[in-house]
Amino acid sequence: VACKVQKDNNAVLPDLAEFKTVLARFKNLYVKEKGICRFYDKDNNIIIGFNPDFLLDAIKATAAKKFYYSKGNKPALFETDNIKMVVMPVYVKEPTTKGEHHYIDVFADGSMDISTVTVE
């Protein structure tokens, strides 16, 4: 195994069709932004973030319903019976530059929303 991932924690992935719809809407609304998909735990704390395009690829390739991780800055494992895929997370921090910052948020139950953080 080239990259070992500890399965200390897991998070529910959004439905593939719903994620494609939300990602398309995000890209349509915020053409110039790269976007980050932030995952939250049941207490609404950010646990891990991904490039949404890489996340989409992992969901499509594995058909996984959840992923495993040890910490928010370590690789995450997406797996089904015969397929394993490791995805590196992105660093998630509160924005400091002025303006609006947009994110795709995935909650503990797999539901999603596009959120905006405004820095004055």
Image: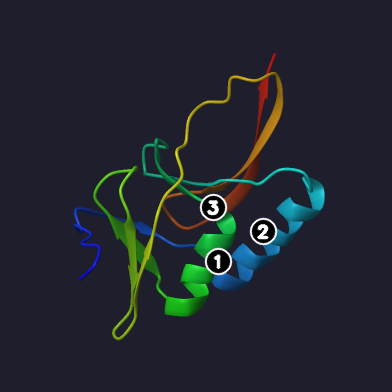
Label annotation for residue 56: 1
Q: Position of residue 95 (x, y in %)?
A: 57, 25
Instruction: Give the CA distance from mark 3 to mark 1.
Output: 9 Å
Asked which quadrant contains residue 73, the reply is: top left
Per the image, label 2 sits on a secondary structure element best described as helix
In terms of sequence position, does the residue under pointer 2 or pointer 3 come before the other? 2
**Residue at the spot x=62%, y=48% of the render?**
113
**Residue at the spot x=66%, y=46% of the render?**
34
Q: Nearer the viewer, residue 79 or 13?
A: 79
In terms of sequence position, does the residue under pointer 1 or pointer 2 come before the other? 2
The residue beneath circle 3 is: 51
Residue type, numbered disc 1: Leu
Instruction: Give the CA distance from mark 1 to mark 2.
Output: 9 Å
The residue beneath circle 2 is: 23
**Residue at the spot x=37%, y=43% of the render?**
42
| Mark whose residue sits in front, 2 or 3 | 3
Per the image, label 3 sits on a secondary structure element best described as loop
Instruction: Give the CA distance from mark 2 to mark 3.
Output: 11 Å
Residue type, numbered disc 3: Asn
Q: Position of residue 84 (x, y in %)?
A: 32, 75
Q: Is residue 86 above or below residue 114?
A: below
Q: Is residue 20 above or below residue 43?
A: below
